[in-house]
Each structure stands twice: as C-alpha cells, then as structure tokens.
Amino acid sequence: LDYIFISMFLNTLTPKFYVALTGTSSLISGLILIFEWWYFRKYGTSFIEQVSVSHLRPLLGGVDSSTPSTSNTSNGEADSNRQSVSACRAAFDPLLSSRYTWVTGREPLTYYDMNLSAQDHQTFFTCDSDHLRPADAIMQKAWRERNPQARISAAHEEKTTTIMEGEGLFKEGLEGGQHNEDTNVLVYIKRRLAMCSRKLGRTREAVKMMRDLMKEFPLLSMFNIHENLLESLLELQNYADVQAVLAKYDDISLPKSATICYTAALLKARAVSDKFSPEAASRRGLSTAEMNAVEAIHRAVEFNPHVPKYLLEMKSLILPPEHILKRGDSEAIAYAFFHLQHWKRVEGALNLLHCTWEGTFRMIPYPLEKGHLFYPYPICTETADRELLPMFHEVSVYPKKELPFFILFTAGLCSFTAMLALLTHQFPELMGVFAKAFLSTLFAPLNFIMEKVESILPSSLWHQLTRI
C-alpha cells in the first residue's frame, strides 16, 4: 500500500525530486515488503491491515462492513459480554476458614470484600420469615455492620480469638442446625469444621469430613469443597488421591481455578523436576514427560498469570481476602498463600516453574485477546481486584506483549515517507527550498573538513589522491 501510494505521487514530481526520491522509495518499499513477510510469518496477519483495522478505522468512525448485522451476531456479543461479566464476578475463598483481624491487629479486608460476605450470609442463611425471629434479625443487623466491634456487640460475631474457640462455636451451631434441617447451614458449618481441623493439624480427620460432605451433598458445588480436599491431600503428600480428585474435577465442561490448574501442573512437574536441568534440556531437547510438565505449566500460567511471581517469591504475599476473582491477582494470592509450601516440598518444582513459566506468553496469539487454551483473559479483573485487595498492596496486572522496536521503527519510517511524498506533491517549490537547506546543513561539516584538508595538503598530492 505504501509503495503504490508513494509511486502515485512520484509521477507528479519534478525530475530532480523524482531522481532523489525514487531510490529512497525503492529502498523503503523493499524494507516494507520484507517486514510484512516477516510479520505475517510470525503473527499470521498483515501489519498494515492490523494497524488500519485497530487504530485508523476507530478514529475515522468506520464500521466493519464484513460484520453481519444479524440477530446471531447480537446474541454472540451478548454471550461474550455475559461471559466477561461472569468471569469478573468474585467468589468466596474456599481455603479461608476465619478472619485474620486478631492475628494482624488491623482489618485486612476491604469494605467491598466484607460487603460481599454479608450478602453471601444473607443469601445462604435467610428467608422471608426471618423478621419474625429475633435471633435472625440480630444476625442480619450484624452482617451489615462494617466495624468489627459493632458486629461483636450486635451478635458476638468474630468474638473468638483462636481457631479452637471458633471450632467449639461451630459444633454448637451444628447441633442447632441439625434440628431445622437447613441444608445451606449444615454444609457451611461442616465445611468450616473441616477447615478448623485442617488448621489445627488434624489433616486426616479433615479429609474424612470433606469426603463425607461431598458424598452427602454431591450437587452442592458452590462451596468448592474439592479445593479444600486437594490442599489437605497435598499436605498429607497423598499424590495418588490428589490425581484421583483432579481426574474428576479437571474436566473440560467444569469451571477451572488456579487450584485445579496449578495442582495438575505440580503433579506433572513432580515426575521430572528432581532431575530437570535447563542446560541439559537445551542440548538434548525435552523428553515426553518434561514436555507434558511444561505444557501443564503453560496451561496454568495462561489461566492465571499472576501466580508464578508469588510462588517464586518475586512478589511479597499478603493475607488473602474472603473473596477471590477467578484468574485475578486475588486468586493468585489465595492460592500461593496456602500452596507455596506444597511446591517447596517437591524437589525442583519451583526451578522448573522458574525456567518455563514466561514462555507461556510467546505461545498466546497476538493480540492477547484471542486466548489459546482458555477464553480470552477478562480486562475487568484489575478493577475488581483493586476493590477486593487492600490499598497497600500493588495489584498485579496481566503482562502486556510489547511490540518489537523494529516494528515501531518501520511503522514510523513508512508514515514519515508517506507524509514527505504528500507534502512534496502539494508544495513542490517550498519542499525544494526545504530540501536544499536541509542537505546544505547536513553536508556543512563534511564541506568544512574538505576545505581544511585542501588547505593543509599540497595541491599535487591532493590531485593524485583525487585521481586514485
């Protein structure tokens, strides 16, 4: 396109400018053709077409005529929008068993995070007739309170300062919940009791409680109890049972999570990480098992690219929030907070992760919105994470693929050449004066040096040198 554009204007120029610009345009056109070929081989699309579609057409207010304006397209866009909204909807952290206020001495949860918890409590544990029961009305008031002391005053919520005290209250609540046969209450309390057992070191007991709970309520997946089970089995180093749980829940039809993806990567890395060496792998190539481990790491990193920096301790951990955003920084914090010890326990696993995780971004198509193994990465996660995470934490954002310098240089050179040809066509005399002044200024130092050389060297010697 640039070659045709420049050639059209060269036909209208004066002979001097035609001679001067023809060589330049041929060189630039050759560079453009080479660059377009390289860019198409690397990214699978034309650079000029991509720039025109992505940047020029929106500025000119153009509309893609190839896009059908049918109801199917509208439905597809609506489905994409709904998927993006659902992808940025926060869910409660399944690994969190109690709030950390008493540990840190300050409130680690944002108001947005606590408000989501209050909404969850009211959704799970209330109904239209609750206003008839004073105890339920008190709890609704406590959930709406922002200040911890106000919640304690209203309903003694968060009054316990140890997990053992919390476990005792949950056991009392379980006895009361079994009488009214409220499924949500029973599942919530039993899961909390299992997490208390896990935190108190009674891991086998916690595993049994979680398995019983999953058998008793197989369709109640909103609490993600299988993620609690995976973490507990990893603590027991019962990798065979971990693989069995993954075989059931790491299915293409089920929603994924960082726990699912990174646990699968950990198991595959465990088979090769103790003997993995990047130098040896570069010489002989990757074996089948090593390739499977690397692909599993790439899959996990594409799902949530924020996790590796926490696992590799390149970024400091903070206490996780009560709610996490799938594929967001909040999910990465929650996963690394509870699973870092499991990665450290497997010899060489973090080394394999360190050597391979950044290669994920070379495999994802460009632009990044296309995705590779999963649906496109949601652009709304950064905003939602800033609401969930405290102000002192620097929110991690999705790594951007930077354009190479050669692409930027070539684009600038093409644009400058086209602008120069346009100005020469519109104002030939003025551009002639400008070109003459520019060339005179450019060659002024060379002329000055030549004059000095002529004045120093004998005329006979200078004559012989010019003849040579």
Image (spheres, grey):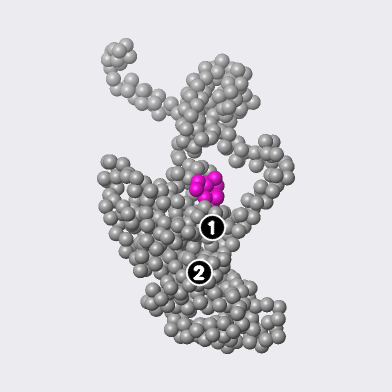
**SS at circle 1:** loop
How many circles with numbers are drawn on the protein?
2
- Residue at 61 percent across and 74 percent down: it is 124
Labels 1, 2: front one = 2
- Residue at 55 percent across and 70 percent down: it is 217
Q: Main secondary structure of the magenta part?
A: loop
**SS at circle 2:** helix
**Location of mark 2 (residue):** 214
The region drawn magenta spans 368-377
Residue at the limit of the structure toward the front, as seen here: 215
Per the rendering, the mark at residue 44 is none
Q: How far apart are marks 1 and 2 (CA)?
A: 17 Å
| Residue 218 position within the rendered picture, expressed as x and y whole percent measured from the top left | 54, 67
- Residue at 63 percent across and 51 percent down: it is 80
| Residue 365 position within the rendered picture, expressed as x and y whole percent measured from the top left | 50, 43
| Residue 412 position within the rendered picture, expressed as x and y whole percent measured from the top left | 52, 35
Q: Is residue 95 left or right of residue 13?
A: left
| Residue 95 position within the rendered picture, expressed as x and y whole percent measured from the top left | 47, 70
Per the rendering, the mark at residue 255 is 1
- Residue at 61 percent across and 28 percent down: it is 423
Amino acid at dot 2: Met
Q: Is residue 376 magenta?
A: yes
For marks 1 and 2, the one nearer the N-term is 2
Q: Does the magenta stretch include residue 69?
A: no
Question: Can residue 299 be seen?
Answer: yes
Who is closer to the viewer here, 359 or 72?
72
Q: Is residue 353 left or right of residue 46?
A: left
Who is closer to the viewer here, 211 or 465?
211
Residue 45 lies, with reference to residue 189, above or below; the image says above
Amino acid at dot 1: Pro
